[in-house]
Structure formats: C-alpha cells, structure tokens
Image (cartoon, rainbow, N blue to C red):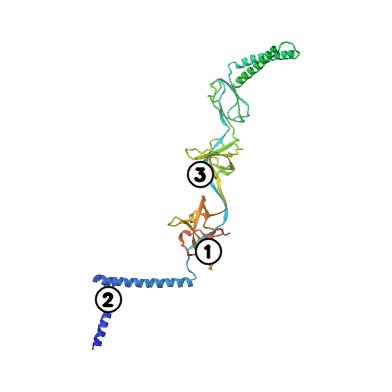
Amino acid sequence: MKKIYSLLLIILVLASCEGKKNKSIETLISEGNIEELRAKKSEILLEQKKINDQAKQLDIEIAKLDKTKKLPLVTTFLAEEAIFNHYLEVQGNVQTKKNIVLHPEFSGILNRIYVKEGQQVSKGQLLATIDDGGLSEQLAQMQVQEALAKTTFERQERLWSQKIGSEIQFLQAKANYEGQQKAVAQMRSQVGKTAIRAPFSGIIDEIITEQGTVVTAGQSQIIRLINLRDMYVEAEIPETYIKNIKKGKQVSVFFPILGETISTTVRQVGNYISPTNRTFKIEIFIPNKKGIIKPNLTAKLKINDYTNESAILIPQSIISENAEGEQYVYVAASSEEENTATVKRVIIETGKTQGDFVEIVSGLNNNDIIVNEGARSVQDGQTVKISSKDNDE
C-alpha cells in the first residue's frame, strides 16, 4: 500500500513540473512568480543556443555542397613596380633680367627721341639726346687747344732729340699736351652723357617722357626697354624642399592665360631663406621663341622633387584605416575554384601621393593581387568572387 502512495506522489510531482513547464509566457507573467520566470528564460535561451548551433552546422554542410553559392563580387588588379615621379606644384611669375627703365645721366631738355614704341633696337643704338647746354662748343674749343698742344709737343720732342733747346721746355710741352688730352676726354664723357643709348638689344616697350620735357639726371624716366629672349619664372619654394629641389630638375610650366605648357629645367636655386615666410627662390628658364610670354605673366609649376624607379602605386580610394590608425588593403590569394579567392588584410605604409594614387613604402610586393572595387565590403579571410582584373589585357 505504501508503494502505491509513493508512486502516486511521484506522478503528481512530475505532473506538476510538466504543467509548470507547459505554461505559456503570458500565464507566467500574470502569475508573477519570479523563480518560474527565471526558469522559463533559462529554458528559452538554452533552446535558442541549440538552434543556433544546429543552424551553423547546416550552413557549413550547405557551403560544402552548394555549388551555386553567392560570394561577394570584387575586382582586382596586379601590383606592378613602375617609375614614380612626384611633383611639387607651386605658382610663379615670369621675369626677365633685361627689363629696365632708362634714366638720363645729364639734366636738361629732352631734345629728341629717335625711336618709337614697339621698335626693335640694337645694343648701343642712340635712343634720345638731351640739350648739352653748350658743352659741345666747349669740347670743340678744347679739341683745338689739344691739337695745338700736340703740335707744340711734337716739335719740342724733335728738337730735344737733336739736343736743341732745354729739357724743361720739352717736359712742359709734354705735360701740357697730356693735360689737354685728359681735359678733352673728360669733356667728351660729359657730352656723351647727353645721349641715351640702348644698354642691350631689345624692344622699346614704352616712351615715358615726351620731347621738350626738362629731365633730371638719375630721376626722370625716359624709356622702358625689354628683351623677351632671356625669360625665366621666379617662384618661392618652402624650405622643407631644400634637399629635393636642385639645379637641373625637370619642370613643367603651364601658362593658364596662354593655355600652353613648356618642359624645361631649374637653372638656379637661391641660397637665402627668407625669415618671414621660410622660403627660398628658384629660377626656371623659359624659351620664348614666339615672343608671346611676357613679364609678370602667371605660371603654374610642377617640379619633379622625388623619383622612385621601382614604386608600387595603388588608388587612395581602396585604402582603409583601423582603430589604431593603421592603413590596410586586401590582398587576394587564388583558390581551387575558378574566379574565386580568399582575401587577406595587409597593413601597409604609404609614401608620397600624386593625383589619385599613393606610393606604397612597405606591406605590398610586386605581383600581389589587390582587391579594388568591393574592397570596402569584404572581411579578412572571406572568400570572394573575382569578376575581372583591372589590368588584364
């Protein structure tokens, strides 16, 4: 009899537990028994874990058996070593060392101008004259006295060679002649200052003072003379580039107004660094056979400041950065299946940039296959499908 009671008690307990187990969530919530709620939550989480584990096992088996699986679609390109030229881009102005305004050396009335604006002149050519105020007449008189002194000296010299006359007479005649020569030369120099001549061959760009105007030595501006053959661009370069910008460096010069580009070289590098803006000056020779390049014309310069003979270049758009600030790209390793690959995250170090491309200093090797389009949507170790290789023929 006791066995029967014990069996009935066990059945009642099991039934009670089963009943609690089969209670709905709504019933448990309405009853408000915290122990039963916690037990129900643990039961649900355990069931959820079992289901997730089973789903993962099924995914693994499906991946092994499914030949039509959908993989992330990417494009790739082959990393190849190439010559990399980096260019410093700055702005400069066209200059010429033969662009001067001529001033008179003599004060007086601007007597005559012999040239016109736009006229080509030669070195030494007479451009204008100033009224000498009677210096020419004085010079003529002094030349007469010089001629007389010369004649006197020559006669005394002949007599003295024959031991006729005194030595003092000979020396006086010689001194008088030499003094007259120097006086004439000095006066001739003064008269010469009344003439304005071209110091070099060029073009009369502007006649600033008209005929008949009183001009002052060293102050009045008479004529602007320009030579457009010896042209150069002057630019200021930051001192950080002082090791890279050298004489003979290649330069591409673009004139926005003219729409023309000239390839030339750096002909001079300044040795002085300005304390105000920390720059030094350079000169770049500009051939100007057509004569269309003018002083003060704006020019945009691209100066080759760095060259790497075996650089690997990649687009900047495919480079990502992790939380530590490291830059990385994805490299694809071919798999057994056609047009599929496994991607690997590779930390890289970048160098100089030029346009949309950046130089890779470390991290990539020649002939590495780099993920291009789709690089932002893949993960390390993921299998991808390659739709095309950008540098395939």
What separation in Å lies between label 3 and label 1 (alpha carbons)?
41 Å
Question: Quadrant of the image for the C terminus?
Answer: bottom right
User: Given the current orientation, which residue lies at the most extreme bottom position?
Assistant: 1
Indicate which disc residue 20 carries.
2
Question: Quadrant of the image for the N terminus?
Answer: bottom left
What separation in Å lies between label 1 and label 2 (alpha carbons)?
56 Å
* Residue tagged 1: 333
- Earlier in the chain: of badge 3 and badge 1, it is 3
Residue 105, image x and y in percent? 57, 23
- Earlier in the chain: of badge 3 and badge 2, it is 2
Decide which of 375, 368 is in the foreground and name it: 368
Is 66 rendered above or below residue 261? Answer: below
Residue 182, image x and y in percent? 64, 18
Indicate which disc residue 229 carries.
none
Residue 281, image x and y in percent? 53, 39
Residue 346, image x and y in percent? 49, 59
Q: Amino acid at mark 1?
A: Ala
Can residue 81 be seen in the rendering of this structure?
A: yes
Judge the density around disc 2: few (<14), some (14-19), many (≥20) Cα neighbours within 10 Å. Answer: some
Assign a secondary structure to mark 1: strand
Residue at 29% x, 72% y: name it: 39
Judge the density around disc 3: few (<14), some (14-19), many (≥20) Cα neighbours within 10 Å. Answer: few
Residue at 46% x, 60% y: name it: 377
- Earlier in the chain: of badge 1 and badge 2, it is 2
The nearer-to-camera label among 3 and 1 is 3
* Residue tagged 3: 240
What separation in Å lies between label 3 and label 2 (alpha carbons)?
80 Å
